[in-house]
Image (cartoon, coloured by chain):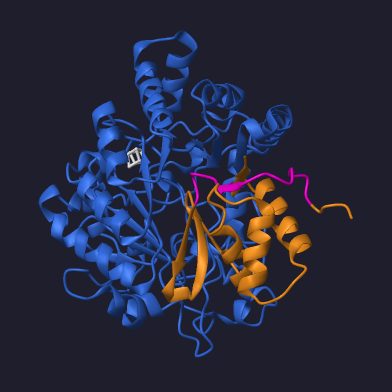
Amino acid sequence: MTATSSPPTAQADPANRPGPPLWLLAEVTYRCPLHCAFCYNPTDFARTTPADELDTDGWLRVLHQARALGSVQCGFSGGEPLMRDDLEILVAEAHKLGYYTNLLTSGVGLSPARAEALKAAGLDHIQLSFQDTTRELNDFLSHTRTFDLKQQVAGSIKEMGWPMVMNCVIHRLNIDHIDKIIEMALALGAEYLELANSQYYAWALLNRDQLMPSRAQLERAERITKEYRQKLGDRLRIFFVVPDYYEIRPKKCMNGWGNVFLTVTPDGTALPCHTARMLPGLDFPNVRDHSVQAIWYESEGFNRYRGTDWMHDSCKTCPDREKDLGGCRCQAWMLAGDPSAPDPVCDKSPAHHLVQDAVARANQPGALAARPLIFRDPKASRALSEQAASSSAPARPAGTTA
Amino acid sequence: MTPATSAPPTACPRLNGHFRLQFETAQDAWVLLYPEGMIRLNPSAGEILRRCDGSRDIPAIVAELEALFDTRGLDHDVRAFLDMAGTQRWITLS
Ligand code: SF4
Ligand code: SF4
């Protein structure tokens, strides 16, 4: 899944105590049958083995504790959450507790029987992702069997009365087919379609040069999307998200650190955002050892970048500091090597040239890097973990220096 | 007087099945939940929406609201809100 949908806003109380973690993202497993080159799971995900995953009771405890604090949205994600055979149990409990329940899936493993069981458990919404668009598109255009799987899953979603929300990660290699992607979503009966450019974290950072579209590609895709919007009106609502590297002000990442989002990773580590584990010098608490309440309100990990006190002067004295809260801490660490620095997307950041350089590379004629894509799989993950163990610098794409 | 809404006077508003309305103690408010999102409602919006169950027509909702808040003349406001809620697809009019 991607974290680009507009998040709810929290009601912080006057004593400056943060509001509740309105959004609970349960990353129930890193297991996944797919190998997306833009996967947002950490590159060292294979360190978490299936035996390290929280068990059913562990997840049920998290659901209870977060709901008691005031969480209302619960997302089941992964990896591929359908790889957990207790997913129906978790969804049923979440529903009973009063969460709005969301399943973020590629659809692999969603048999009609499981769709029915999830409906009976009270699942409110499925976000179905196109992952391997190249293959899916080929299959769609050539009417082959694998596309039948997507069609069957889409059929189940309709039949169960869930809203039809589809998501497609857009990048340099598929953006020129944006019209066909929209047609494919239409053929599947989508009501909402999110066309989100990959954000350059984790695997997508490793593959950044291959994934970042050129300005001309982006402009064309936006133009075509607009034409479809006009043509389709209410029939299909299309959201288009550009890569933040093309902006000059950073996004208000996660709507503020420790403000509304709580992610729990497969092994029970609690994070303010699904990529935050990469940050140095922070020991993120585990739900096996601490209550969600203590984690949210008292842990160092969650308090570290709340508000504006931690900021460097460039952000602290900036009139926009409340607007974006200095942007993304992970991006500051990955690119500028300092998690308290302004997000280098910001053109006031001393490290902004790094973003500009990456954009410039994407806009050289014939720029597609010769290096092959690195696909997300356990073997590549173990190799990357070993490399990382012998260096303390943030993982950067090949050929980049700070 | 022209009614503020395009809805026929006998329409019975009903919450869209993809949305869920519930009272949240932690926020001391009615909230409307939908795929990956939440809208925090003010008290009157919450009281109107919880009556959109397909069994009451608009005059009935107006009458209940006027009784609840011990006031009169809410017709225009209720209709304006329902109009907006219809545009947002929170409710359907049947
Ligand atoms: S490999 Fe693809 S489908 Fe699997 S978790 Fe990563 S992004 Fe999702
Ligand atoms: S200097 Fe900091 S606070 Fe100001 S716009 Fe840039 S990132 Fe945001």
Q: Residue at x 49, y 82 (%)?
A: A310
Please determine whether, in this image, residue A80 is positioned above or below residue A52: above
Q: Position of residue A363 (x, y in %)?
A: 64, 38
Considering only vertical position in the picture, is A156 above or below A374? above
Q: Is residue A18 left or right of residue A377?
A: right
Quadrant that contains the N terminus of chain A:
top left
Q: Is residue B76 visible?
A: yes
**What residue sits 40% from the left and 80% below the top?**
A303
Q: Nearer the viewer, residue A311 or A297?
A: A297
Q: What colour is chain B?
A: orange
Residue range in magenta is B5-19
**Splitting the image into four quadrants, where does ligand 1 fall?**
top left
Q: In the rendering, what colour is chain A? A: blue
Whether residue A58 is situated above or below residue A197 in the rendered picture: below
Q: Residue visible at 42% across and 75% down?
A: B26
Instruction: Give the left or right position of residue B75, taking residue A339 as reference.
Output: right
Q: Quadrant of residue A294?
A: bottom left
Give coordinates of residue B14: x percent, y percent: 56, 47
Q: Position of residue A46 (x, y in %)?
A: 20, 48
Residue B9, magenta (yes or no): yes
Percent coordinates x, y for residue A94 in the rendering: 29, 56
User: Most extreme residue toward the left, as rendered?
Assistant: A51
Principal secondary structure, stretch drawn in magenta: loop
Foreground residue among A261 and A269: A261
The quadrant where residue A362 appears: top right
- Left or right of A13, for residue B68: right
Residue A33 visible in the current orientation: no
